């Protein structure tokens, strides 16, 4: 149940229904948590929900046409849910932190490469690609902080809830 609650929160923030500071969003953490706590057969749910929020954001909020870079982002969503699956049985603080940082770094690399490849904002050269990455550095800082913050919060809340449930079961015996 928490996985769906965290996903709904991430979708609301991603679609700008719940505004947070720019590049400070729970998307990576929600995907990791969903992958860790829900069966793989449900993986399509967060991918579809966040893809729909992304389409809404691109069309309604920014006024952009749908483009191939969105497909890259959607594939990244699926990758984060799968990465979260590796935390299903061993979700220590270190492993969650590493997964979160992996999410931050991979999104930075993949999404900015897609922007460079699809849009005509930067020259199609190594210099243009580097300019695209440099322009994205200020957003990367907030992304890392938010990914670590929300991953700690989501997995921490999940741990506390599970402990509370175990205490309740033990108390009734």
Image (cartoon, rainbow, N blue to C red):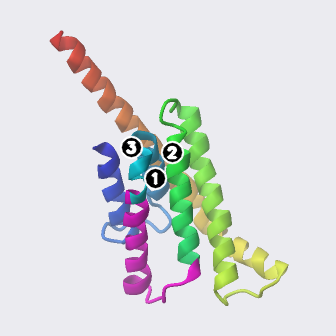
Q: How many marks?
A: 3
Q: Tag 2, which secondary structure?
A: helix
Q: Which residue is mark 3?
A: 38
Q: Looking at the image, is 44 positioned above or below residue 61?
A: above
Residue drawn at x 41%, y 36% is 156
Label at residue 31: 1
> Which part of the image, by quadrant, shows the C terminus?
top left
Q: Tag 1, which secondary structure?
A: helix
- The answer to which of marks 1 and 3 sits earlier in the sequence is 1
Q: How much space separates mark 1 and mark 3, taking CA atoms?
A: 10 Å
Give the foreground label among 3 and 2.
Answer: 3
Specify the farthest residue to the top. Answer: 173
Please name whichever residue, 75 or 124, is drawn nearer the observer in this view of the structure: 75
* Magenta stretch: includes residue 116: no
Q: Which residue is mark 2?
A: 84
Q: Looking at the image, is 100 positioned above or below residue 107?
A: above
* Magenta stretch: includes residue 52: yes
Residue drawn at x 22%, y 18% is 169
């Amino acid at each position: 149940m928490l996985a769906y609650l965290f996903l709904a929160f991430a979708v609301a923030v991603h679609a700008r229904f719940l505004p947070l500071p720019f590049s400070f969003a729970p998307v990576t953490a929600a995907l990791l948590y969903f992958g860790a706590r829900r069966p793989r057969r449900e993986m399509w749910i967060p991918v579809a929900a966040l893809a729909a929020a992304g389409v809404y954001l691109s069309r309604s909020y920014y006024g952009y046409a749908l483009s191939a870079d969105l497909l890259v982002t959607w594939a990244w969503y699926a990758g984060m849910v799968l990465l979260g699956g590796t935390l299903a049985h061993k979700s220590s603080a270190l492993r969650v932190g590493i997964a979160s940082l992996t999410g931050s770094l991979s999104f930075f690399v993949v999404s900015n490469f897609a922007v460079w490849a699809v849009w005509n904002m930067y020259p199609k050269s190594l210099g243009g690609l580097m300019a695209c990455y440099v322009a994205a550095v200020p957003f990367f800082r907030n992304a890392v902080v938010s990914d670590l913050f929300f991953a700690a919060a989501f997995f921490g809340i999940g741990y506390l809830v599970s402990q509370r449930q175990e205490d309740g079961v033990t108390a009734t015996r």
